[in-house]
Image (cartoon, grey):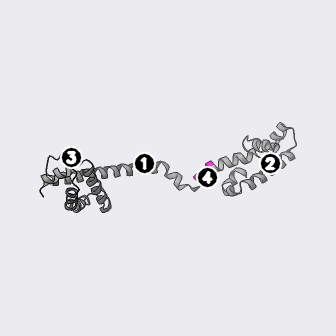
Amino acid sequence: MDENNLIILLQQGDKNAYKQLFIKYYSPLCEYASQYISDDDSEELVQELMLFLWETRENLVIETSLKSYLFISTKHRCLNAIRKNQYHERIHSQIYEKIKDQFEDPDYYFVNELTENIQKAIENLPETYRETFTLSRFGEKTNVQIAEKLGISVKTVEYRISQALKILRLKLKDYLPLLINILG
């Protein structure tokens, strides 16, 4: 069957014409596409082209030969696939560059979780322990300054801080290696 009749029958929805077209051109198009992209990708690309031909058969306008149309379409689809792949690789590379330090620091993933758990643990301390501990660790007050501010003895300040630390160590034991510098 010549190309013009094949195109006409294809446009009319003749499945046998489509089958002939597929049998005749599928392998050569895959071989041609594999010069640009991987074998697996080339097979998928040619299958998509063949499906496109079937789905748009009624509006199919071929100004050159069918063979030229198919090979040119395959080449353009390959170039588009390469361009798309390069774009994805460039975006991936840019994203990776922005966050690679986070990947290299295993503690990074625990920071938000750790922060939330520390805040919860401190909030759950008895009020007097919480107030004393907060002034000591976050208010940067000395034990003498805390004692004066709260109207208690320095020994009471020391006791409350030690008790707060015991409670926090128990509640945050899973994070203990990361907390050594914070809790002292």
**Callout 2 amino acid:** Ile
Tag 4–tag 2 contact (CB < 8 Å): no
Instruction: Check residue 60 in the rendering and tell me which mark sits there, or answer none.
Output: 3
Q: Distance of mark 3 from mark 2, alpha carbons?
A: 82 Å
Residue matched to label 2: 161
Residue matched to label 1: 94
Name the residue: 79% across, 41% down. Answer: 131
**Mark positioned earlier in the residue sequence (3 or 4):** 3
**Mark positioned earlier in the residue sequence (4 or 2):** 4
Foreground mark, 3 or 2?
3
Tag 2–tag 1 contact (CB < 8 Å): no
Q: Distance of mark 3 from mark 4, alpha carbons?
A: 58 Å
Q: Distance of mark 2 from mark 1, alpha carbons?
A: 47 Å
Q: Residues within 10 Å of mark 1 (few under 14, many from 20)?
A: few
Nearer to the camera, 101 or 144? 101
Q: In the picture, which quadrant includes the N terminus?
A: bottom left
Tag 3–tag 2 contact (CB < 8 Å): no
**Mark positioned earlier in the residue sequence (2 or 1):** 1
Q: x and y percent of residue 72 in the render?
A: 20, 51
- Give the left or right position of residue 81, taking residue 145 as reference: left
Residue matched to label 4: 110
Tag 3–tag 4 contact (CB < 8 Å): no
**Mark positioned earlier in the residue sequence (4 or 1):** 1
**Callout 3 amino acid:** Leu
Name the residue: 51% across, 52% down. Answer: 101
Q: Distance of mark 4 from mark 2, alpha carbons?
A: 25 Å
